[in-house]
Amino acid sequence: MTSIVFFGSSPYSLPVLAKLLSLPQYRLVGVVTKPDKPVGRQQTITPNPVADFAQKHHLNLIQTDVFDQNFTRLFSQLKPDLGLVVAFGPPFFTQELIDVPVYKIVNIHPSPLPKYRGATPGPWQIINGETTSAITFFQIDSLPDHGPIIRQIPFPISANETANSLYQKAFSLASSHLSQILSSYLAPSPVLTPQLHSQKSYYPKFTKETAQIDWNWPPEKIERFIRALNPWPIAWTYVSNQKQQKLRLKIFSARLINQKIVPDLVQIEGKKVVSWQEISSSYQI
């Protein structure tokens, strides 16, 4: 039986974690995720979805946001045969950590590597108008999203794709192929394909500030930008009200009609989510 330590911190990690737990040939010896954080207006300390899942299933939960010597020692004590990473984020793995498991550490990344390396591959693929993507299983090395590819599974990007739907599609696909791919990888002499690093691309992580809409872009790109930034950080722009006050307007969804962006679901800062039609007479973009 192969012992595995799972790394994940996102709701998108859960399909793969649940699938792994259901496979009898693997023994889950640890789940590593980020520490609980304050959430919402009340700043209530809350576990992330992976921590919550691990607690409910009585799994060995380890919460950390640093890979220091204490973590390295704890990781070694688990005696894992394999590490499996799904939507975990930084910190990055050191070579010392990578070398602990017999079969190293495998990452599952929602882009056709080496294209779209980095923390936000989903939104950028949508913004750039890509029509196909892939979920990539690869062996981690000491550089981000750089190691050799185990397997890539392509899938289409639909015309109404959001970051949320793209990630759900990608990691659902990963979970359905997990057993076969891990079996092949753990077999003697697995086939690993070096990435074509000359074809690499990397795009920065979004922040709330970089989610501002650039109205100089073509309308098609703006519409893709709005879809791509759902569910986070949500595209926004400034609007003015009848008193000429300047306010932020989040745009959750919009339509492209006759080469013009027509907002759908929106939210004025400090107010509830409504349809743009309800408030368009009171605000101007």
Image: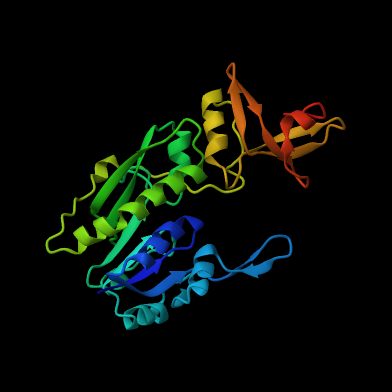
Q: Which residue is drawn at 20% across and 50% down?
A: 194
| Viewer-side residue, 145 vs 137 | 137
Question: Image quarter for residue 154?
Answer: top left
The residue lying furthest to the top in this view is 258
Q: Measured from the top left, where is residue 39 in percent x and y?
A: 65, 63
- Say which residue appears at 84% left-offset and 32% top-offset: 244
Q: Which residue is drawn at 33% across and 83% down?
A: 77
Q: Give the vertical position of 106 relative to 153 (above or below).
A: below
Tell me: 233 left or right of 181: right
Farthest right residue in view: 243
> Residue at 38% across / 61% down in the picture?
19
Image quarter where the N terminus lies is bottom left
Q: In which quarter of the image is residue 132?
A: top left
> How many callouts does the rendering have?
0
Tell me if residue 78 comes above or below residue 271 in the rendering: below
Task: Point out residue 6 in the picture as x, y percentages from the top left corner.
Answer: 38, 68
